Image (cartoon, helix red, strand yellow):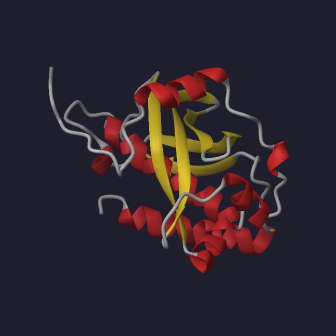
Amino acid sequence: MNVIWRTLLQLALSRRKFRRHGAMNSLDVGRIRLTTLPTDLDVVGHMNNGRYLSLFDLGRFDLLMRTGLWDLMRERGWYPVVANATISFRRSLQPWQRFVIESRVIAADERAVYLEHRAVVKGDIYARLVVRGRFVRRAGGVLPIAELFEAIGQDPAEIPAPEEWMLRWAEDVALPSARTPAPSVWS
């Protein structure tokens, strides 16, 4: 709930861009402008590390809306989930500092889409997030990525394959399937 108003505003702005300019290519970079608000700060007085993840969600919502996928997801009973995420911080965002979130699909395999999000100030990267996300059906099961891209008219063959480090990373940090027990045992 802590960024609900920003989320609703961003969805409205992205919808307006979609209606005015048509669908953006799924491989284009999406950009949204934001300002570090007092509610984004931690006790040290800069952007809270967890808030970056919430604000990067806005970049994903923008891509979903502006590629036309948002409406297709609602029609077909699909929804996105984050499977893995890794973030690196370079510089701190200060109160009232303006920044841009840049978001782009960087790769895909048969089960997941890999996205990169950047917090950028005057062309300089402050933080970078790589996300591995899946789309699932409300009726159950993971949506094949080829079906997802075909639904928006994107040739899946044009999407780059994940780099080796992405595959290794996804495997190294994976938890067991939801159908498999995963007891919390500390050794």
Quadrant hosting residue 29: top right
**Residue occupying the far front of the picture:** 180
Is residue 85 toward the left or the right of residue 21 in the image? left
**Residue occupying the far bottom of the picture:** 75
For the question of whether residue 96 can be seen, the reply is: no
Residue 151, position in %: x, y? Answer: 75, 66
Residue 17, position in %: x, y? Answer: 70, 67
For the question of whether residue 159 can be seen, the reply is: yes
Total labels drawn: 0
**Residue occupying the far left of the picture:** 186
Q: Nearer the viewer, residue 149 or 54?
A: 149
Quadrant hosting residue 73: bottom right
Q: Residue at x 69, y 60 (%)?
A: 148
Q: Residue at x 55, y 59 (%)?
A: 61
Residue 36, position in %: x, y? Answer: 40, 45
Q: Quadrant of the C terminus?
A: top left
Q: Reply above or below: 38 against 2.
A: above
Residue 126, position in %: x, y? Answer: 50, 28
Q: Reply above or below: 151 against 112.
A: below
Is residue 32 toward the left or the right of residue 108 in the image? left
Quadrant hosting residue 184: top left
Q: Quadrant of the N terminus?
A: bottom left
Q: Residue at x 55, y 74 (%)?
A: 77
Q: Reply above or below: 24 against 130.
A: below
Q: Nearer the viewer, residue 176 or 121?
A: 176
Q: Residue at x 62, y 79 (%)?
A: 75
